[in-house]
Structures are given as structure tokens and as C-alpha cells.
Image (cartoon, grey):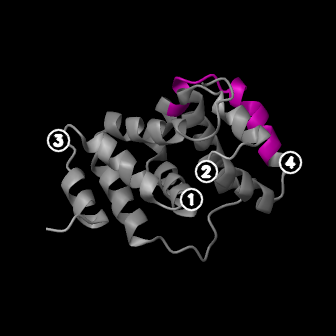
């Protein structure tokens, strides 16, 4: 059997497998930047009620408020570019500010961005966006994981974004 994105997804989507979390993260990283952003948006909107307590309960949101305030002052085009920069680990001031947040604060930051997107304050996923089969399949795989695995996947993918200027 050839090793393809879908065959890996089908194999690793079983939450009983010990390596379902790292496999899911690996598949996320194979998505292009805009698909990664879309997956985060759909994950937060579809699973948001369960993510909310984990994201905000363990975080000190005041550390992310400054970044969120900066987002609110930007045009939608600038917001999208900054989200892409954070996702791509571009060496920008906002990406560096994001990079020094704790992992829980990063999780809460993306939750708050999703909330601001729903309110129209931050650029939403464009109405013309069509979810690729890779995004759709990966989102379904994440939904099949148990709650702690879902949070672990989301926390690890957002933790790996941005630039930590203090890391060696």
C-alpha cells in the first residue's frame, strides 16, 4: 500500500492508537498555511464549547490582550497577513510577541481570535473558501480524538507557531 496523506489519516485517526496525537500534528503541519488557519477556525467554531474552558481556564489572557488589541486596530488584509506570519514563523514583531506566550496563552489567543472572527472584528474565513478534503478529513480525525487528545493537538500546533526570541 502506498503511503499517502489519506492512508496515514485513516491509520492514525483511531484515538486508541498511542501515537494518534503526534500523527495528527504531523498531518496538520503538512497543510498549507491558509488550510492550517482554516482548520483552526473550524476546530474552534465546531468544538469551541469544549475548547473554551481549557483554553481560557489555564491561561492568563492579559498576556495575550496586547496582541489582540493590535489585531483589532488592523485592516482585515493586515490581520490575515499577521496570522500567516505567525503560522509561518516569520520573524516579525507580532510573531515574536506571540512566540513568548505560554502554550496555554497561545491556545487562548487563537480561541479569542476565533471569537473576534465570529464578531467580524477580525477577518473571517472568506465565504468563498471551500474546505479541502485534507482539511475536512483532518478535522474529522481531530473530532474523533478524545477531549484531552484534541486539546493536546491544538495546543501543540499553536505552540509551534511564532518566533520565541529567547529560545536558543
> Any magenta on residue 68?
yes
Q: In the drawing, does residue 150 fall left or right of residue 110?
A: left
The span from disc 1 to disc 4 (Cα, nearest Å) is 23 Å
For marks 2 and 3 on the same chain, the one whose residue lies earlier in the sequence: 3
Q: Quadrant of the N terminus?
A: bottom left
Q: Residue at x 30, y 47 (%)?
A: 23
For marks 3 and 1 on the same chain, the one whose residue lies earlier in the sequence: 3
The span from disc 4 to disc 2 (Cα, nearest Å) is 22 Å
Q: In the drawing, does residue 135 fall left or right of residue 8?
A: right
In the rendered image, the residue lying farthest to the right is 73
| Image coordinates for residue 63, horizontal then vertical, percent | 70, 25
Q: Secondary structure at mark 4?
A: helix
Contact check, label 2 and label 1, Cβ < 8 Å: yes
**Which disc number belongs to residue 88?**
2
Does 76 appear above or below 48?
below
Quadrant of the image occupied by residue 107: top right
Q: In the drawing, does residue 62 fall left or right of residue 37?
A: right
**Which disc number belongs to residue 33?**
1
The region drawn magenta spans 55-71
Q: Secondary structure at mark 3?
A: loop
In the rendered image, the residue lying farthest to the left is 1
The residue labelled by disc 4 is: 73
For marks 1 and 4 on the same chain, the one whose residue lies earlier in the sequence: 1
**Which disc number belongs to residue 16?**
3
For marks 4 and 2 on the same chain, the one whose residue lies earlier in the sequence: 4
The span from disc 2 to disc 3 (Cα, nearest Å) is 31 Å
Amino acid at each position: 500500500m502506498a503511503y499517502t496523506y489519506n492512508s496515514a489519516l485513516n491509520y492514525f485517526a483511531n484515538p486508541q492508537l498511542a501515537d494518534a496525537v503526534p500523527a495528527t500534528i504531523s498531518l496538520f503541519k503538512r497543510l498549507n498555511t491558509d488550510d492550517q488557519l482554516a482548520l483552526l477556525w473550524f476546530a474552534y467554531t465546531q468544538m469551541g464549547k469544549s475548547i473554551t474552558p481549557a483554553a481560557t481556564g489555564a491561561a492568563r489572557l492579559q498576556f495575550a490582550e496586547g496582541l489582540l488589541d493590535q489585531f483589532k486596530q488592523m485592516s482585515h488584509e493586515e490581520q490575515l497577513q499577521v496570522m500567516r506570519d505567525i503560522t509561518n514563523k516569520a520573524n516579525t514583531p507580532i510573531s515574536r510577541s506571540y512566540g513568548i506566550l505560554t502554550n496555554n496563552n497561545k491556545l487562548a489567543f487563537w480561541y479569542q481570535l476565533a471569537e473576534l472572527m465570529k464578531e467580524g472584528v477580525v477577518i473571517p474565513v472568506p465565504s468563498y473558501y471551500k474546505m479541502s478534503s485534507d482539511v475536512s478529513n483532518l478535522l474529522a480525525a481531530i473530532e474523533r480524538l478524545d477531549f484531552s487528545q484534541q486539546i493536546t493537538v491544538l495546543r501543540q500546533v499553536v505552540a509551534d507557531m511564532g518566533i520565541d526570541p529567547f529560545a536558543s
